[in-house]
């Protein structure tokens, strides 16, 4: 998915990355971030303007399953920022707004975990959307009881259906109640958006997995979360493709060493080379600016 390109001066220092309106670190207001009484129990730290929860993968999956079993008036949604998201978040006010309304923010990407430790605000581990979704399914399978109702939104034609079949074979207590492959540019078509919302409402899922790519998926769920008839929505990127076997994840040893980005780059060089080059140039400057600008802060409770 194409990203908005940044116009950068030829000689750049970290301060040249200031957005049009400077954003000073603010105290985290839990009422603004999560309106429901059943809030995430984890502490959060402010990194790169984001309030990120200090949750392990297992704890995040259990939290989502608890939410899936709780009645609520609007959909809670989850975002999983990586380095590319951090760069976009810095420059895009709409994406910052979407992140502020998210019920759960967990860090995807070894560079973010390393940066959190360097900045004295350590996150426990990487929690990628492509790991969080199957861990949620496993938690539902282990807990038993009523099936977890799943809706898959995104990926190419036929991919979500193959993913649904694979999910049910591996996790019998996860029931896929609907899939939808929206057309290109659907986010600008109000009638199409209403068709998607109606399809979700008719299926009555507990969890909606959104695989539309960033920042489209985050902006879409932020815009419509009060109308989405699901208890939880996860912005999960290529997860539907992984579940369908359409794309292959990196070997476990590469994931453990924080090298999954290298596997993806080798798999899709045309699509990712420019993005990764840009992020490799900008992200270290954002880390340097964080080091210079903010003192080490104690974690905040939600």
Image (cartoon, helix red, strand yellow):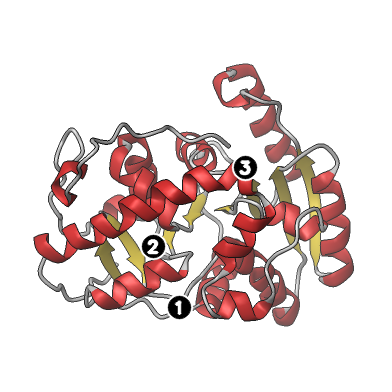
Residue at figure coordinates x 28%, y 36% from the top left:
8
Q: Secondary structure at mark 2?
A: loop
Q: Which mark is residue 125?
A: 1
> Quadrant of residue 27 in the image?
bottom left
Residue at figure coordinates x 54%, y 47% from the top left:
273
As drawn, 110 above or below 90:
below
Q: Which mark is residue 270?
A: 3
As drawn, 251 above or below 20:
below
Horizontally, is 133 left or right of 16 in the view?
right
Q: CA distance from mark 3 to mark 2?
A: 45 Å
Q: CA distance from mark 1 to mark 3?
A: 30 Å
Instruction: State the residue in front, 82 or 153.
Output: 82
Of discs 3 and 2, which sits in the foreground? 3
* Percent of width and height locating residue 296: 14, 73
Q: Which mark is residue 165?
A: none
Q: Disc 2 marks which residue? A: 37
Instruction: State the residue in front, 214 or 18.
Output: 18
Q: Is residue 69 visible?
A: no
Q: Is there a contact, CB below 8 Å, between mark 1 and mark 3? A: no
Q: Quadrant of the C terminus?
A: bottom left
Badge 3 or badge 2: first in the primary sequence: 2
Residue at figure coordinates x 63%, y 63% from the top left:
263
Of discs 1 and 3, which sits in the foreground? 3
Residue at figure coordinates x 43%, y 75% from the top left:
55
How many numbered discs? Answer: 3
Horizontally, is 295 left or right of 94 in the view?
left
As drawn, 156 above or below 150:
above
Badge 1 or badge 3: first in the primary sequence: 1
> Quadrant of residue 287 in the image?
bottom left
Outermost residue, front direction?
10
Horizontally, is 65 left or right of 176 in the view?
left
Q: Is there a contact, CB below 8 Å, between mark 3 and mark 2? A: no
């Amino acid at each position: 998915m194409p990203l908005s390109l940044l116009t950068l001066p030829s000689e750049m220092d970290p301060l040249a990355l200031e957005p049009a309106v400077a954003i000073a670190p603010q105290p985290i207001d839990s009422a603004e971030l999560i309106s429901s009484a059943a809030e995430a129990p984890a502490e959060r730290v402010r990194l790169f303007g984001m309030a990120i929860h200090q949750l392990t993968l297992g704890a995040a999956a259990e939290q989502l399953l608890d939410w899936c079993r709780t009645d609520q008036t609007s959909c809670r949604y989850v975002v999983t920022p990586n380095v590319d998201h951090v760069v976009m978040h810095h420059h895009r006010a709409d994406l910052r707004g979407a992140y502020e309304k998210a019920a759960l923010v967990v860090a995807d990407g070894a560079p973010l975990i390393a940066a959190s430790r360097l900045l004295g605000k350590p996150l426990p581990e990487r929690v990628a959307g492509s790991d969080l979704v199957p861990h949620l399914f496993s938690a539902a399978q282990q807990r038993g009881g009523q099936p977890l109702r799943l809706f898959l939104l995104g990926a190419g034609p036929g991919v979500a259906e193959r993913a649904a079949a694979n999910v049910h074979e591996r996790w019998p207590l996860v029931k896929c109640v609907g899939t939808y492959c929206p057309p290109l540019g659907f986010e600008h078509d109000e009638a199409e958006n209403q068709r998607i919302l109606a399809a979700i409402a008719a299926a009555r899922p507990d969890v909606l997995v959104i695989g539309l790519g960033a920042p489209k998926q985050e902006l879409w769920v932020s815009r419509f979360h009060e109308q989405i008839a699901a208890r939880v929505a996860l912005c999960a990127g290529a997860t539907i493709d992984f579940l369908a076997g359409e794309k292959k994840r990196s070997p476990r040893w590469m994931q453990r060493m924080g090298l999954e980005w290298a596997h993806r780059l080798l798999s899709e060089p045309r699509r990712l080379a420019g993005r990764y080059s840009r992020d490799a140039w900008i992200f270290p400057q954002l880390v340097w600016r964080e080091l210079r600008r903010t003192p080490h802060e104690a974690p905040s409770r939600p």
